[in-house]
Amino acid sequence: MSALTTELPLLREAEAATRTVAKVVVMAPMPEPLDYLIPDTLHLERGNHVLVPLGHARVRGVVVGFDTRTDENLKLKAVLHRLDDPSVPEAALDFWLWAAGWTLTPPGVFLNGCLRALRVARGQVRQGYVATGQTPQRMTRARERVIETAVLPMGLSDLAMAAAVSTGVVTALEKEGVLEKVDLPAADDYRAPDPDFAPATLNPGQAAAHILLRNEAAKDTFAPVLLDGVTGSGKTEVYLESVADILRERPESQVLILLPEIALTQAVLGRLKARFGVEVAQWHANISNGSRRRIWEGVAAGRIRLVVGARSALFLPFPKLGLIVIDEEHDSSYKQEEGVRYHARDLAVFRARQDGAVIIMASATPSLETLTNAEKGRYAWVRLGERHGTAQLPDIALIDMKAHPPDKGLWLSDPLVGEILDTLQRREQVMLFLNRRGYAPLVLCKACGEKLSAPNTDSWLVEHRASGRLVCHLTGFSMKKPAACPHCGAKDGLTSIGPGVERILEEVEQRFPGVRAEVFSSDTAPDALTSASLIRRIEDGEVDIVIATQAAAKGHNFPNLTLVGIVDADLGLKGGDLRAAERTFQLLAQATGRAGRKVKPGRAVIQTYTPEHPVMQALQHQDREAFYAYESMSREIAKFPPFGRLGAVILQGRDQNQLNRFAHELTLVIPNSPGIDVYGPADAPLALVRGQWRKRFLVRADRNRDLQGFLAHWLTSVKRPSAIRQIVDIDPYNFL
Ligand code: ADP
């Protein structure tokens, strides 16, 4: 009895001193979550959004956990209040926090990016347009498309995009009473996709691949798969069936299809709609703020079960993913190169592991990373052998430019010109591929030798004749092309050096008078709308010769396109980039794969000064394995990815002396760690950008070493002057 009475007051004391605190990631560059007291009136859960005091400011934050604290004089500030934004689901929060650590980004900075969609207010009732059944006084093809598309109510920009018209066409039809304005029911925006709407009839090879994918899904655990097949073999067709399987059989799971940004076209969206019977939620740079918020909330609530998007869609708040598809998994646009640097494919593999999901990586030219994982048995490897139906892979010929040099100022060799003429005579289409925007990559003054570059930047200005401007593709700087050299003042001395697509257009128009030629690049097709209408015109046979950058290298099936000419195959091999050969191979294999996608046989002609190069040989003989074997061997010798890991540290500052001093200080404290080598500091190839000097370190680690841990330890061991910016790039793809 006495024992009890003495114990009671003690217990109370302990109770009084124990407080639960919320761990909050605040939207600021703090290395760790901060602790805040929880007012008695507030019930908080992990994933809640809160407003908290920070210094003299009030900032947003997300509750990431709880802790109990017993110090009696706890001098913590308290959470101010809970915000009513939808909570971040557990799995999404875990993933974001992990990804922040992986990319060495302060968690608040990382989460801030993931929550950007919530920054816009919830939309008022949105209005859209629907067809009334009236016919317009004047019918055009564009108007016809709008009327066909507006059977269900659609928002203005969505409708214009889907019908490949300007918004003016839509509003004009409304004025005539052919369309009427109606409220868009918010909940109806993304109707549930129907897995049984229009199942594909797979050919035997595709059906076998589909069964293998089903077997992987049946394991009900993390299952990474390489879906490997030549362009046109039906990879999309097959993975859409896997998407349907998950939608049908796992009602609690969601599906994400990731595509390279430029492949997110009306054609792909149209295919999804045809397969699943609804407009699928799409997430990319050009969607409206309103759609952004609706999709974010719909995904967090589990209402939206299927999303197709570019790389950042990976950070939508999915409570549970059952399947992630990464189409064209080798595409370098999955690597984000600005702000937080991450590789969406690598992070997606982690997310799939976390959720016990299937991840399908599809490609005709897989990355060496993924291929090596498949070869070592870490990923399942599902192959699709042939093109669907009667379509054949194109014949590929190399043209040795040393033997067939074009005249000065021209870029197409006689053999290629002959092939183009033959193709035009058969009334078939030609694509000339040159991965270089604009007219000329360099403008030089003949009088003084000056190469025009952007102010305080090491990068040349590219001449764009269509717009009459000189543009820096690195910084975005542009100026009207001057009449005289800005350096020496000489008039008429500025000469354009080398070709871009606009210059090839000029040559084509000169050599083939009357031919209908057009450039397809991010300049002529900067958004989904213009690219959709250009694609339609090509499909409708309104263009004879398409002069294309990588913006058109993939994704499209132009049935009448039977000749692809690669203008300068050596272009991508220049520069000391680790993946230069791999990327050239992939890009050219994709580009040559554009020919003969349907019934007509295709042909590809590659102009090169290095026909003996393993890339060119592999392309000519369509011997992918030989190329990968060569590439894999050279990487293995250097212990470079995928046989080792890389991280880059880029330092930037206006004061070159201070930058050099700090880089030197960092060199002195490089930790000694077996299996990890640090190279540098070296001047970055672009050593001056917008007045900022740049230095780089490259860190190579054996596969089993903790690269991030090493970097975190090293980079925090000296104090960095605030005028110097530091960028960490895990697994860099860009060596500028
Ligand atoms: P990939 O993704 O491998 O490039 P796609 O799935 O885009 O190949 O298929 C190439 C073309 O062949 C597309 O036009 C597609 O609709 C068609 N196709 C492929 N498989 C089938 C099939 N089983 N039935 C009908 N059409 C198919």
Image (cartoon, helix red, strand yellow):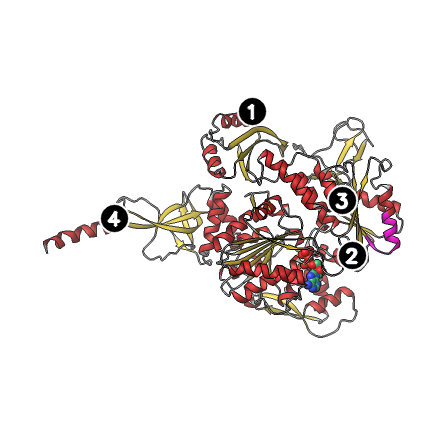
- Dot 4 surroundings within 10 Å: few (below 14), some, or many (20 or more)? some
Gap between marks 1 and 2 measured at Cα? 55 Å
- Choose the circle earlier in sequence order: 1 or 2: 2
Q: Which residue is disc 1 drawn over?
A: 657
As measured in the structure, the alpha-carbon distance from the residue carrying label 3 to the one carrying label 4 is 76 Å
Lower position in the chain sequence, tag 3 or tag 4:
4
Q: Compare marks 3 and 2 and give the one earlier in the sequence.
A: 2
Placement of the N terminus among the 4 image quadrants: bottom left
| Disc with the residue nearer the chain's start (3 vs 1) | 3
> Does residue 514 appear in the picture of this structure?
yes
Residue type for callout 1: Asn
- Residue 647, how many percent across, how many down? 54, 37
138 over 567 or under it: above or below:
below
Image quadrant in which you'd find residue 201:
bottom right
Q: Residues within 10 Å of mark 3 (few under 14, many from 20)?
A: some
Q: Which quarter of the frame holds ligand 1? A: bottom right
The residue under label 3 is which amino acid type? Gln
Q: Specify the segment rendered in magenta.
A: 419-429
SS class, disc 3: helix
Which residue is nearer to you in this view: 432 or 216? 216
Tell me which amino acid carries mark 4. Answer: Ala
578 magenta-colored: no
Q: Which residue is mark 3?
A: 620
Q: Residue at x 13, y 55 (%)?
A: 4
Q: CA distance from mark 4 to mark 1?
A: 53 Å
Q: Which residue is mark 2?
A: 538
